[in-house]
Image (cartoon, grey):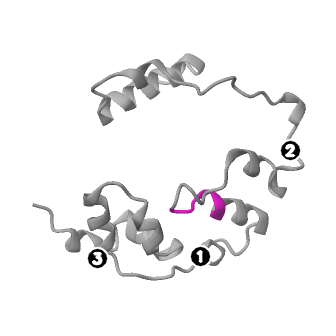
């Protein structure tokens, strides 16, 4: 048995720190979560609006904070889509549409087809995939 209340009230719980900035999920966002254990855990956090990323990054380009806020929204359905993110003002000076390509279909890595894909196996497979492009990196 896990005491969720104990873990959500500590200063070191990562979600507590995230929610202090982003705010806790709304009821609408909570309804999008499939797993009941995740809902139960998140409901243990003190409801709050959050201070916002601008309060943490006051000296950062407002366009950078804007795109970050859009990418870090709790609800995946409300996060910025890739095409919109690429059109964001922050990227306009560095983006070269002539060099961009689009995959003809969804990219599926071989290991994603495995039946028993636990966290350790996933980490090892990601490392193997990264090493294909960076062989100088150590194995996991």
Residue designated by label 1: 52
Q: Secondary structure at mark 3?
A: loop
Relative placement, left or right, of 32 versus 38 is right
The picture places residue 27, in percent across and down from the top left corner, at 43, 74
Relative placement, left or right, of 91 versus 60 is right
Q: CA distance from mark 3 to mark 2?
A: 42 Å
- Nearer the observer, 132 or 87: 87
User: Can you say which quadrant of the picture contains the N terminus?
Assistant: bottom left
Q: Secondary structure at mark 2?
A: loop
- The residue that appears at 31% across and 64% down in the rendered structure is 39
Label 3: how many residues lie within 10 Å, few (<14), some (14-19) or many (20+)?
few
The magenta span reads 69-74
* Numbered circle sitting on residue 9: 3
* Numbered circle sitting on residue 94: 2
Q: Answer above or below: position of 90 versus 107.
A: below
Q: Kindly tell me whether residue 35 is visible in this rendering.
A: yes
């Amino acid at each position: 048995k896990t005491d969720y209340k104990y873990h959500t009230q500590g200063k070191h719980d990562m979600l507590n720190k995230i929610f202090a900035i982003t705010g806790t999920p709304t009821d609408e966002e909570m309804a999008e979560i499939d797993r009941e254990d995740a809902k139960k855990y998140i409901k243990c956090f003190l409801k709050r609006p959050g201070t916002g990323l601008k309060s943490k990054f006051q000296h950062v380009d407002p366009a950078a904070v804007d795109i970050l806020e859009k990418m870090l929204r709790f609800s995946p359905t409300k996060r910025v889509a890739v095409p919109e993110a690429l059109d964001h003002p922050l990227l306009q000076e560095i983006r070269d549409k002539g060099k961009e390509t689009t995959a003809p279909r969804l990219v599926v890595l071989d290991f994603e087809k495995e039946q028993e894909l636990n966290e350790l196996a996933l980490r090892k497979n990601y490392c193997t995939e990264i090493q294909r492009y960076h062989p100088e990196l150590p194995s996991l």
